[in-house]
Image (cartoon, rainbow, N blue to C red):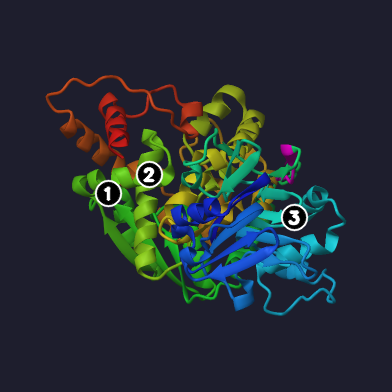
């Protein structure tokens, strides 16, 4: 939806530090921009119009990607009814209409108020002088993906959603705290860059910074052991989540990152059944499994599909851009980013501003093949705990990367499988209904049964799991590019930090020495 950034300082510092952050992250929100500086709010279509020689103790910045209905006054930063509070918000609160009905109508609430304004109304109505405790109360009511920063002029409080779908980074230096939606906005500031963990709240005031508990995804009991009950409840939760994520979107068409696998096809089918125009984007080598499967199932379901073909030349040219975008150079992270980045880029060119994907289904329903080994070696209870562990780490493994590759193209990503209610429902389901045993080649049984029930073809509903980088052919392309680069040369072993759940489960090294060394060579050239 946007970029947010800002600072809290004990002594006044130049506000240009915030406009500089906005410039570096303008791709996240190119439509409108705003600045809060010690009580004063400025808004403009151009960031340069906000630049000045002024100084402030508290400064908040915002760049907007317009995707929901709202009026001109909804351009952020937003100010509360009595002027006490100001807020910048990145993301979407999906249950804002339900929360609107709980608010005091005498506090300036209007029918056209969007989810960000309702969020501010919630904080404003509960605010009693303790901003941290107020935010701690409010986040427990929210269903959505979000990072927001709110100030009363004396401190800044920053909250992140419990799954960590939306990122926020910060630096503390010489009595000042700076924050931004992407690391690149903080590179010119001295100090170590940290990340506010999912479900946590950062508080910055004259006493320094502190991290506090916000809201967590509740750990429900495992109480769904009947297959029919699991199907009914999961289907309802997922359908409701997709409907909430479509609510209020003011554009005519949404997109889908589409591999031809069950996870993406199921979401696309639900969106299509709601009557929405959906454009699906599949990226891969011309003969890759993803391309072949996506083409077949899209035709059978009558979905609008756009193919984006990649080859060695495409990948070679793209890798520096990917590394710069995701702010990582680990081989797995870079490879997985390629298909989504190209899909988001194509969607952006088509004017699509909201795109869905199938992230999270494998963690909820034991989709990865290594979960079989967990069952074989440790049993179903251990598997359940491992699924929770992987959900907790999804922000670090995948979500921050996926936010950056989509927002780099001014496209907002929505992930229905990681909706708060979907996660809770799915994790109430016994793991015995997700995977039969340690030899089960199919897995995700409840999930697949729902797909087949709503009309996803059998060959897709029960298609064998493949990872994005292999199904698209990107892994083999990177391997070939790296081998060609080092042909006839000695390859020195290079170790680069990487992320991903497979590193927690697999003993084998990922990729080849040439591939890792190639990542290192690219990084040096950026």
* Secondary element at tag 2: helix
| 492 versus 72 height, above or below | above
Q: Is residue 216 magenta?
A: yes
Bin the neighbour count of mark 1 within 10 Å (Cα to Cα): few under 14, some 14-19, many 20 and up. Answer: some
**Viewport quadrant of the N terminus:** bottom right
Q: Nearer the viewer, residue 295 or 306?
A: 306
Magenta segment's dominant SS is strand
Q: Nearer the viewer, mark 2 or mark 3?
A: 3
Q: Is residue 497 magenta?
A: no
For residue 78, which quarter of the picture?
Answer: bottom right
Q: Is residue 283 left or right of residue 356?
A: left
Q: Whole-Å distance between the Cαs marked 2 and 1?
A: 26 Å
Residue at the image position 60 percent from the left and 23 percent from the top: 378
Q: Nearer the viewer, mark 3 or mark 1?
A: 3
> In this view of the protein, can residue 218 be seen by the observer?
yes
Residue at the image position 75 percent from the left and 40 percent from the top: 212
Q: Whole-Å distance between the Cαs marked 2 and 3?
A: 35 Å
Residue 153 disc label: 3
The residue to which callout 2 is attached is 324
Q: Nearer the viewer, mark 2 or mark 1?
A: 2
The disc, 3 or 1, on the residue closer to the chain's N-terminal end is 3
Q: Whole-Å distance between the Cαs marked 3 and 1?
A: 55 Å
> In this view of the protein, can residue 168 be seen by the observer?
no
* Secondary element at tag 3: loop
Where does residue 178 sit, x and y in percent of width and height?
A: 60, 45
Where does residue 187 sit, x and y in percent of width and height?
A: 47, 41
Range drawn in magenta: 208-217
The residue to which callout 1 is attached is 288
Where does residue 444 sit, x and y in percent of width and height?
A: 54, 45
**Viewport quadrant of the C terminus:** top left
């Amino acid at each position: 939806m946007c970029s947010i950034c800002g600072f809290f300082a004990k002594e006044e510092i130049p506000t240009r530090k915030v406009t500089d952050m906005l410039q570096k992250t303008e791709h996240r929100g190119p439509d409108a921009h705003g600045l809060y500086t010690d009580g004063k709010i400025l808004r403009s279509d151009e960031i340069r119009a906000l630049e000045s020689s002024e100084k402030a103790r508290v400064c908040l910045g915002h760049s907007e990607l317009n995707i929901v209905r709202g009026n001109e006054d909804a351009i952020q930063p937003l100010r509360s009814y009595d002027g006490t509070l100001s807020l910048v918000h990145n993301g979407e609160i999906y249950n804002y209409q339900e929360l609107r009905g709980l608010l005091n109508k005498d506090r300036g609430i209007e029918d056209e108020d969007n989810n960000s304004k309702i969020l501010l109304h919630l904080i404003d109505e509960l605010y009693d002088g303790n901003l941290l405790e107020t935010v701690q109360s409010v986040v427990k009511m929210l269903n959505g993906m979000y990072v927001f920063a709110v100030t009363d002029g004396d401190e800044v409080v920053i909250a992140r959603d419990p799954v960590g779908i939306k990122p926020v980074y910060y630096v503390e230096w010489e009595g000042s705290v700076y924050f931004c939606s992407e690391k690149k906005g903080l590179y010119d500031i001295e100090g170590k860059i940290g990340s506010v963990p999912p479900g946590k709240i950062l508080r910055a005031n004259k006493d320094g910074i502190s991290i506090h508990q916000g809201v967590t995804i509740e750990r429900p009991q495992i109480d769904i052991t009947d297959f029919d009950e699991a199907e009914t409840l999961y289907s309802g939760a997922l359908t409701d989540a997709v409907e909430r994520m479509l609510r209020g979107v003011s554009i005519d068409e949404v997109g889908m990152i589409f591999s031809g696998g069950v996870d993406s096809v199921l979401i696309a089918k639900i969106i299509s059944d709601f009557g929405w125009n959906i454009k699906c984007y599949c990226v891969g080598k011309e003969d890759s499994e993803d391309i072949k499967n996506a083409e077949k199932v899209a035709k059978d379901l009558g979905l609008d599909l756009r193919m984006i073909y990649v080859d060695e030349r495409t990948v070679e040219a793209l890798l520096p851009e990917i590394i710069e975008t995701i702010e990582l150079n680990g081989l797995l992270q870079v490879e997985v980013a390629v298909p989504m980045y190209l899909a988001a880029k194509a969607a952006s060119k088509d004017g699509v501003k909201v795109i869905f994907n199938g992230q999270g289904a494998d963690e909820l329903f034991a989709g990865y093949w290594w979960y079989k080994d967990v069952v074989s070696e440790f049993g179903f209870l251990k598997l359940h705990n491992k699924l929770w562990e992987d959900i907790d780490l999804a922000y670090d493994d995948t979500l921050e990367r996926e936010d950056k590759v989509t927002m780099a193209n001014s496209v907002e990503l929505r992930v229905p499988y990681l909706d708060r209610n979907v996660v809770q429902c799915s994790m109430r389901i016994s793991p015995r209904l997700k995977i039969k045993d340690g030899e089960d080649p199919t897995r995700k049984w409840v999930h697949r049964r729902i797909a087949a029930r709503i009309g996803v073809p059998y060959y897709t509903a029960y298609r064998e799991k493949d990872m994005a980088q292999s199904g698209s052919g990107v892994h083999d392309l990177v391997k070939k590019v790296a081998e060609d680069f080092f042909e006839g040369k000695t390859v020195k072993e290079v170790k680069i930090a990487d992320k991903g759940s497979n590193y927690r489960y697999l003993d084998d090294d990922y990729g080849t020495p040439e591939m890792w060394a190639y990542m290192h060579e690219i990084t040096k050239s950026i």
